[in-house]
Image (cartoon, helix red, strand yellow):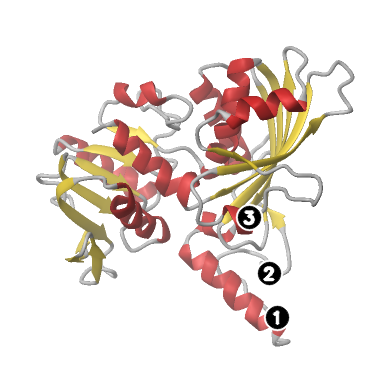
Amino acid sequence: MFNCIAIVGATGAVGQEFISLIEKRGLKAKAYKLLSSARSAGKTIQLNGDALTVEELTPESFGGVDLALFSAGGTVSKTFAPIAVKSGCVVVDNSSAFRMDANTPLVVPEVNPDDARHHHGIVANPNCSTIIMVVPVWPLHCANPIKRIVVSTYQAASGAGQAAMLELEQQTRDVLAGDEAKPIIFPFQYAFNLFSHNSDVGDNGYNTEEMKMVDETRKMFHTDDIQITATCVRVPVMRAHSESINLQFTNPITPDEVRNILRKAPGVRIVDQREPQCYPMPIDASGGNDVLVGRIRQDISQPDGCGIDMFVSGDQLLKGAALNAVQIAELLQ
């Protein structure tokens, strides 16, 4: 049991999921501390039946805290995570601040749980799109090494936080009422539209989100040998990401072999029924812990039998963020 667990960003979308998961999964501590910006300080939130007052995050917030779950953005993490570590706290960070730091383990418990135990005070939570991809891809890679991944994402509003979810809701109302959609969080109309992920585009033409999927996967798989290319797109879905994944294996593999491997894989649920057509959908993945996997089929463009196509959906706020971080915390108990 932890002495005290702090949640940094407690009033945000992921912070709220932290609180719910602590209750549901029984992540025990003698005390809990809810931290947020000065704007949210003073709010009251229920946790395990107790009414806790949200406190303003300051450098003095971590006295007596031995675990902190951070989800308040990279700037906050870069400033306060090292302060928390110096106070004797282990940080599980949901931002991109430390993911590619050589001394910080990047962990998905279904993939590389042992890495979490080799931390120096901080364990990084991967990008949500990466998590949802690697949960089903890792067990396949263990059975038959993967040479290449081609992935296209269909990313929900929740990936950009509560304000983005509210923007999608409001724009949908406005458009249906015949009014003009007003972009605030995103540069374009979100309702009834889709667009390239709004992260910065680098010199190689890939945006930051796409390169996260490349770099983070290689780090967790402990290899640079896998060739990975990604295209990341925002779609007007509230909270579950979906991905089309094409895999090239070292040796021939059949769809039935893939299904047999994934049936035994933790964190995966196969949804792959041709008649009637029943495949992964974000509406079904929302609120669930598992990554749904379906449309498993032979890639007919690879005549050697080494190619597989599949489609996945996973809740971005749960397995893509809060659940994965809480699972890391459970490894550290």
Q: Residue at x 69, y 26 (%)?
A: 258
Among numbered discs 2 and 3, the one appearing first in the sequence: 2
Image disc number at residue 189: 2
Crowding near the residue tagged with mark 1, few <14, some 14–19, many ≥20 C-alpha atoms within 10 Å: some
Drawn side of residue 108 relative to residue 69, left or right: right
Please, what secondary structure does the residue beneath circle 3 have? helix
Drawn side of residue 253 relative to residue 232, left or right: right
Please, what secondary structure does the residue beneath circle 1 have? helix
Residue 156 at what x, y percent from top left?
60, 56
Alpha carbon separation for disc pair 1 and 2: 10 Å
Asked if residue 322 can be seen in this view, the reply is: yes
Among numbered discs 3 and 1, the one appearing first in the sequence: 1
Q: Which residue is mark 3?
A: 282
Front-most of residues 296 and 316: 296
Drawn side of residue 38 relative to residue 232, left or right: left
Crowding near the residue tagged with mark 3, few <14, some 14–19, many ≥20 C-alpha atoms within 10 Å: many
Front-most of residues 254 and 242: 254
In the rendered image, which quarter contains the C terminus? top left
Q: Are marks 1 and 2 in contact (CB under 8 Å)?
A: yes
Q: Which residue is mark 1?
A: 175
Among numbered discs 1 and 2, the one appearing first in the sequence: 1
